[in-house]
Image (cartoon, helix red, strand yellow):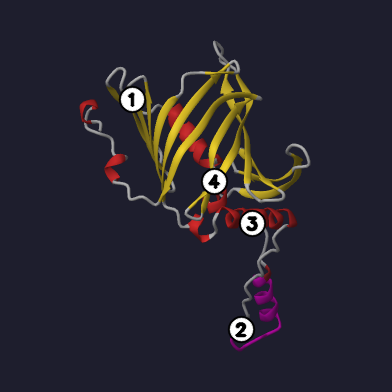
């Protein structure tokens, strides 16, 4: 059994016959100095916030994006789907996809979500795998890193050095590690400080098997454009195990547009989906 230092002090004073009141001066422990690796990572984050717009970036509460989502199969692009995306920080998102006149609506609010399928005229709650996909997308987002939401889950931040990023280009790498073992690496341009890449690993079930395999996923950010003082990537290419699987190409992005709460509320029936 361990005895605290303060209790030891009291016992010593009593043994010395101290008859008056014992006054032990409590001192608040000094905070431990930030590790150099964490300090370097924090500096990279601070710089990224500034180049993305500083206070204008941090004051963004909602985003409305329009554009095209294109899936890739065996290196070939498939038929693009038009999308309209509504996002309210930190964890509300509604995305509407339209392909050949058929609309699909996927909506998430925190740990809940629903899907409307225009092809079958059905409205259903999201399955656990879909909810987990949304949680992972929130965890791996640039906003999660720069806005500090990861601190709520006691994740740890560290600097992972510089990496090659093309001819005469280098990226600074920051790693975010969660207590459950999940980690994400974010790369920022060493010269311009802009976000360039997001990489993480996850377990995926092997087809026709009970086994799982670890796969690497990666988002590459391109065509960064400033709108009303806030910079955002207009092209996001997604890769799985080194092969491109999709591209998001924005036509427009609006910040801080008022959004009705009803956008994210599950309708009573498929007929009432707007």
Which residue shows up at 46% across the image and 23% down it? 80
Location of residue 4 by image quarter: bottom right
Which residue does the numbered mark 3 point to in the structure image?
A: 47
Count of marks placed on residues: 4
Which residue does the numbered mark 1 point to in the structure image?
A: 103
- Residue 76 at what x, y percent from top left? 57, 17
Q: CA distance from mark 1 to mark 2?
A: 73 Å
The quarter in which the N terminus is drawn is bottom right
Q: Is residue 220 above or below residue 254?
A: above
Which residue does the numbered mark 4 point to in the structure image?
A: 225
Which residue does the numbered mark 2 point to in the structure image?
A: 23
Q: Any magenta on residue 66? A: no
- Residue 156 at what x, y percent from top left? 63, 49
Identify the mark nearer the N-term, 4 or 3. Answer: 3
Q: CA distance from mark 3 to mark 1?
A: 40 Å
Q: CA distance from mark 4 to mark 2?
A: 63 Å
């Amino acid at each position: 059994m361990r005895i605290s230092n303060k209790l030891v002090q009291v016992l010593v004073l009593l043994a010395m016959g101290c008859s008056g009141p014992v006054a032990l001066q409590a001192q608040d422990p000094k905070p431990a100095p930030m590790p150099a690796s964490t300090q370097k990572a924090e500096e990279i984050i601070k710089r990224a916030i500034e180049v993305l717009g500083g206070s204008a970036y941090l004051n963004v509460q909602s985003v409305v994006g329009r554009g095209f989502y294109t899936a890739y199969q065996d290196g070939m692009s498939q038929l693009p789907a038009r999308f309209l995306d509504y996002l309210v920080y930190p964890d509300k998102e509604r995305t509407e996809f339209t392909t050949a006149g058929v609309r699909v609506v996927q909506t998430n609010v925190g740990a809940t979500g629903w899907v409307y399928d225009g092809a079958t005229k059905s409205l259903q709650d999201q399955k656990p795998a879909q909810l987990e996909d949304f949680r992972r997308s929130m965890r791996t987002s640039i906003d999660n890193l720069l806005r500090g939401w990861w601190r709520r889950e006691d994740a740890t931040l560290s600097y992972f050095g510089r990496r090659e990023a093309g001819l005469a280009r280098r990226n600074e790498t920051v790693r975010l590690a969660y207590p459950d073992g999940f980690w994400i690496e974010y790369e920022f341009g060493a010269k311009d400080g802009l976000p360039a890449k997001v990489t993480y690993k996850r377990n995926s079930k092997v087809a026709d098997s009970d086994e799982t395999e670890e796969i690497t996923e990666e988002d590459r950010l391109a065509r960064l454009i400033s709108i009303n003082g806030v910079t955002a990537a207009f092209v996001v290419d997604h890769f799985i195990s080194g092969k491109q699987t999709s591209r998001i190409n924005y036509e427009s992005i609006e910040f801080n547009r008022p959004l009705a709460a009803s956008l994210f509320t599950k309708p009573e029936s498929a007929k009432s989906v707007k």
